[in-house]
């Protein structure tokens, strides 16, 4: 994605963190990760990530979603004998998050997916997270989420993040952002 | 400690979480851990803990300190071949935290320790944490901390917490609270 677009999205994400009253340092604000998963449609499919700490034992971050922005379906696969894949806990801090995982599909899901992406979303068990709500997903579980109409701030506590090994349901998605000169 | 005292302290801790704009669910508020480390002097030595998640891979909690309250000196020792001891990241959310660990002692530390406890505090390398500041301690490192005059809320992200195995510098300290009928 283009640097100037990433800078604009970062400003919107910082505004949501401010609404959530989460204090962010200037260097964290500048280095906040912005990804459109290579689709060039960040208004619909994208994610902003403020990594507090990621080491070989644990990870903590804030996920910031613009209004109705979607983090597309993926899973965190087993890595080796000692690591069955990333386990993660989501705790909503601000806004609403519609989280979907495997299980009984919700007949009337709150999420809204543009038709062109719809076939890449296969799990529809709905968990609604409002501020103070949290849930923990086991490793290797398919999941995806969308913010409500105001956007959302979601804390993620987990075992180590190895983002480049995540498996995405939509072929060709690129998780690690590449910023291109405008 | 007596239940009625724990209830009073819990209310003060919830007030600090509210100042930090951290949303807490009613069941979390009721079950928040309050410990005076068995000393019966919670105004000076004590800690309040809201555990979000603690599993065999990672842990996330909020530590809430009343004004000038001290979490006494301790370390998280190696557990077995796979676990060299708890590694932890502290991020200040509200108030000020004076954190001390091994290293060059601070000539004029900001912390204030009542004289009767002083000999049990042996590391004096000072790290001051204000909202947005964070630091990560390696396993098995001696450390302790005190809130500033307004109290503090400190997020802790870590590998698994096994509190009962912590090693305290002051003999006889009891980390796991026992609440007694009033």
Image (cartoon, coloured by chain):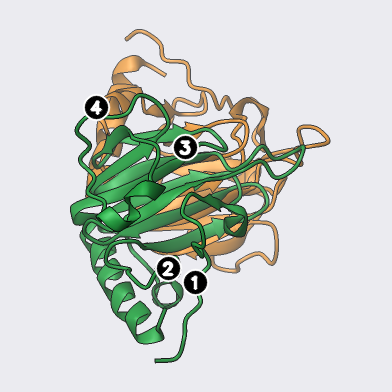
Chain colours: A orange, B green
Disc 4, disc 1: CB below 8 Å?
A: no
Residue A42 falls in image quadrant: top left
Disc 3, disc 4: CB below 8 Å?
A: no
> Is residue A170 in sight in this rendering?
yes
Q: Could you tell me which residue is drawn at 54 percent across and 63 percent down?
A: A127
Chain at numbered mark 4? A
Label 4 to label 1, Cα distance in Å?
Answer: 39 Å
Instruction: Indicate left or right for A109 with A8 as reference.
Output: right
Give percent across and percent down for residue A86. Answer: 66, 41
Label 4 to label 2, Cα distance in Å?
Answer: 36 Å
Q: Residues within 10 Å of mark 1 (few under 14, many from 20)?
A: some
Label 1 to label 3, Cα distance in Å?
Answer: 46 Å
Which residue in the protein does label 2 denote? B35
Which residue in the protein does label 4 denote? A26
Q: Residues within 10 Å of mark 3 (few under 14, many from 20)?
A: many
Label 1 to label 2, Cα distance in Å?
Answer: 5 Å
Please report whichever mark, 3 or 4, sits nearer to the chain's N-terminal start. Answer: 4
Instruction: Indicate left or right for A143 with B121 as reference.
Output: right
Q: Nearer the viewer, mark 4 or mark 2?
A: 2
Please report whichever mark, 1 or 2, sits nearer to the chain's N-terminal start. Answer: 2
Chain at numbered mark 3? A
| SS class, disc 2 | strand
Which residue in the protein does label 1 denote? B177
Disc 3, disc 2: CB below 8 Å?
A: no
Q: Are marks 1 and 3 on the same chain?
A: no
Q: Could you tell me which residue is drawn at 76 percent across and 42 percent down?
A: A84
Disc 1, disc 2: CB below 8 Å?
A: yes
């Amino acid at each position: 994605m283009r640097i100037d677009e990433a800078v604009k999205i970062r400003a919107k994400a910082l505004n949501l963190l401010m609404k959530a009253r989460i204090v962010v340092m200037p260097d964290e604000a500048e280095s906040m990760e912005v990804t459109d998963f290579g689709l060039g449609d960040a208004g619909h499919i994208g994610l902003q990530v403020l990594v507090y700490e990621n080491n070989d034992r644990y990870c903590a971050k804030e996920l910031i979603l613009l209004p109705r922005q979607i983090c597309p379906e993926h899973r965190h696969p087993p890595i080796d004998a000692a690591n069955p894949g990333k386990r993660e806990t989501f705790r909503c801090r601000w806004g609403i998050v519609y989280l979907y995982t495997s299980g009984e599909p919700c007949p009337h899901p709150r999420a809204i997916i543009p038709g062109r992406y719809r076939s890449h979303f296969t799990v529809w068990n709905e968990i609604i997270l409002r501020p103070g709500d949290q849930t923990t997903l086991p490793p290797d579980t398919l999941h995806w989420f969308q913010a409500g109409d105001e956007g959302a701030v979601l804390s993620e506590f987990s075992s180590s993040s190895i983002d480049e090994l995540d498996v995405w349901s939509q072929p060709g998605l690129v998780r690690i952002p590449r910023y291109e000169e405008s």
